[in-house]
Image (cartoon, rainbow, N blue to C red):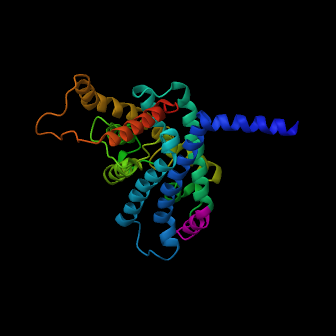
Amino acid sequence: MSEQVSHQRTNVMSKLRRNTGGELLAEFLGTAVLIMFGCGSVAVAVAGLPGSGRQSVPFGAANWLIIAWGWGLAVVFGVYVAGGVSGAHINPAVTLAFAIRRKFPWAKVVPYWAAQVVGAFAGAAVVYAVYHNAIDFYNATQAPPLTRPDSLPTFSIFATFPAQYFGGVWWGPFVDQVVGTALLVGIIAALIDRRNMSPGSNVAPYMIGFVVVAIGLTFGTNAGYAINPARDFGPRLLTFAAGWGNKAFPGNGVWFSNYWWIPIAGPLVGGVLGILIYDLFIGQVLAARVAAGEGPEPGRVPPQRVSTEEERVAAEERERERAAAEGRRPTE
């Protein structure tokens, strides 16, 4: 009897892993990897380097480069981890945009969001477990010493806050998040569009990571470039549990208040806007040309001539990508 029950449980788990359950596990792990590398890079820049005696100057441009490249590489490896199973959304804004414009099943949107937030919380918990000594040392060595609820620098290891020059109003950081996420999702749409100049040889994750680096270097100081609701909300939950108090919820500081919702709403709006703009200006043009059997105009990048085997491999890869985006298994 016990063997029969065990066999039934194994069959149920196997079925879950083959379908939506497996995709949620992939989103969980991919997002956790994203946060471990991303928040880990901020921990190095804020507390690790000065606390270890490896940096004696104040936080500066070099530290910001660590953060920008850390988050970029975090995206690369998060996508590589989860891409073959779930499509590696690892970002609720991407999931929503794909549901609106890429036929991703609406029934999977909320489960994907939940997996992403839980994965982000788990990744942040790992970073906290590794760096809590550095965090406490950093706070203790400030003049005057800081408690966690008063320590904005160590809070920023995990979650974001707006720049002081916004003067405490919400619309400036909100617009920043809309623009940054629109750039991210719009360029993701371009990079995975086989009708366009999408990169080959499975290097798209690196290109997406470079997009995140670019956003960090150009818009990052405005509001910490969350550009991902799970990336901010999951670690923010961790900081609330670990003692940062109202810095986390409702998101209060000396020059900002009730900030917690902006890194959620702004990216969701921006993601939808980004994919709509791409489809309006580029996607519909490409679709019209494909429907008419037309290639690029003279003087534009010509279609490459490929062998039959290369065409077969490319077709299989496109089918896998479509299946991942639509939440189904690829056709054999």
Q: Would you say 144 lies left or right of 287 here?
A: right
Q: Would you say 286 lies left or right of 92 here?
A: left
Can residue 20 be seen?
A: yes
Q: Nearer the viewer, residue 167 or 203?
A: 203
Secondary structure mainly formed by the magenta segment = helix
Can residue 244 be seen?
A: no
Residue 137 falls within the magenta-colored stretch: yes
Residue at the image point whose x is 47% and y is 59% from the top: 42
Can you tell which quarter of the image residue 55 is in?
A: bottom left
Residue 56 sits above or below residue 16 on the image: below
Can you tell which quarter of the image residue 23 is in?
A: top right
Residue furthest toward the front?
308
Q: Would you say 200 lies left or right of 89 here?
A: left
Q: Residue 25: image x %, image y %? A: 60, 42
Q: How many marks?
A: 0
Q: Which residues are magenta?
A: 130-145
Q: Nearer the viewer, residue 295 or 271?
A: 295
Residue 216 sits above or below residue 103 on the image: below
Q: Residue 37: image x %, image y %? A: 50, 57
Residue 138 falls within the magenta-colored stretch: yes
Q: Would you say 79 lies left or right of 207 here?
A: right
- Classify the position of the N terminus by image quarter: top right
Q: Nearer the viewer, residue 145 or 99?
A: 99
Residue furthest toward the left?
299
Q: Residue 156: image x %, image y %? A: 49, 55
